[in-house]
Image (cartoon, rainbow, N blue to C red):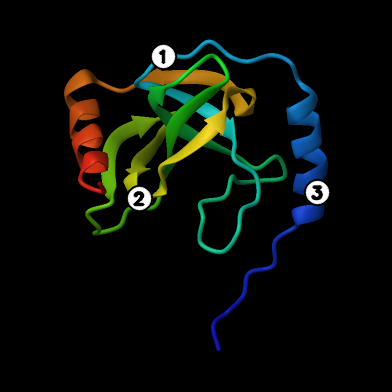
């Protein structure tokens, strides 16, 4: 029987209501790295960390001032084609998890912490295109 990690969906639900009530959509650009409120998610979907459910993400594509496509970052290094090294972000090794691409509302964005180099971003973009 697989080990089930206990997640506090109730606290995240309260935080999510506050984020939803915020009318402040953030100005972002493709290639930006932002702290983002990803929260608590189902199963093996990438969660945010800590009590606030935050995790750095890279903006893959913008669709409007309200929504954008992101890929979460992790400091966990894996020998896996879905993990691409970004080098150091916020003082830690960072890897883009290309298999966890998702659409978010820009209300989830907290603050910008960097920008991905254009050549490295092309590598990430090509990896994402391979999913389709």
Query: How many residues crowd mark 1 within 10 Å: few (<14), some (14–19), many (20+)?
Result: some
Kindly state the secondary structure of the residue where label 3 is placed.
Answer: helix
Residue at the spot of label 3: 11
Residue at the spot of label 2: 99
Query: Residue at the location (80% across, 35% down)?
Result: 17
Residue toward you, 93 or 51: 51
Kindly state the secondary structure of the residue where label 1 is placed.
Answer: loop
Between the C-alphas of marks 3 and 1, the distance is 30 Å
Q: Residue furthest bottom?
A: 1
Query: How many residues crowd mark 3 within 10 Å: few (<14), some (14–19), many (20+)?
Result: some
Seen in the image, is 126 located left or right of residue 62?
left
Say whether marks 3 and 2 touch (CB < 8 Å).
no
Sequence-wise, which precedes: disc 2 or disc 1?
A: 1
Residue at the spot of label 1: 29
Between the C-alphas of marks 2 and 1, the distance is 21 Å
Quadrant, the N terminus? bottom right
Sequence-wise, which precedes: disc 3 or disc 2?
A: 3
Q: In which quarter of the view is residue 109 placed?
A: top right
Residue toward you, 65 or 79: 65
Q: Position of residue 62 (x, y in %)?
A: 42, 20
Query: How many residues crowd mark 2 within 10 Å: few (<14), some (14–19), many (20+)?
Result: some
Q: In which quarter of the view is residue 123 placed?
A: top left
User: Is 88 placed above or below 42 here?
Assistant: above
């Amino acid at each position: 029987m697989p080990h089930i990690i206990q997640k506090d969906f109730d606290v995240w639900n309260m935080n999510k209501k506050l984020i939803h009530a915020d009318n402040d959509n953030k100005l972002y650009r493709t290639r930006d790295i932002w702290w983002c409120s990803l929260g608590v998610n189902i199963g093996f979907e990438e969660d945010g960390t800590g009590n606030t459910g935050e995790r750095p993400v890279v903006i893959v594509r913008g669709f409007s001032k309200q929504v954008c496509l992101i890929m979460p970052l992790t400091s966990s290094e894996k020998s896996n084609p879905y993990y691409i090294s970004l080098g150091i972000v916020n003082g830690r090794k960072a890897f883009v998890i290309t298999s966890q691409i998702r659409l978010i509302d820009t209300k989830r964005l907290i603050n910008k912490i960097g920008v991905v180099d254009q050549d490295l971003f092309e590598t990430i973009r090509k990896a994402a295109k391979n999913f389709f």
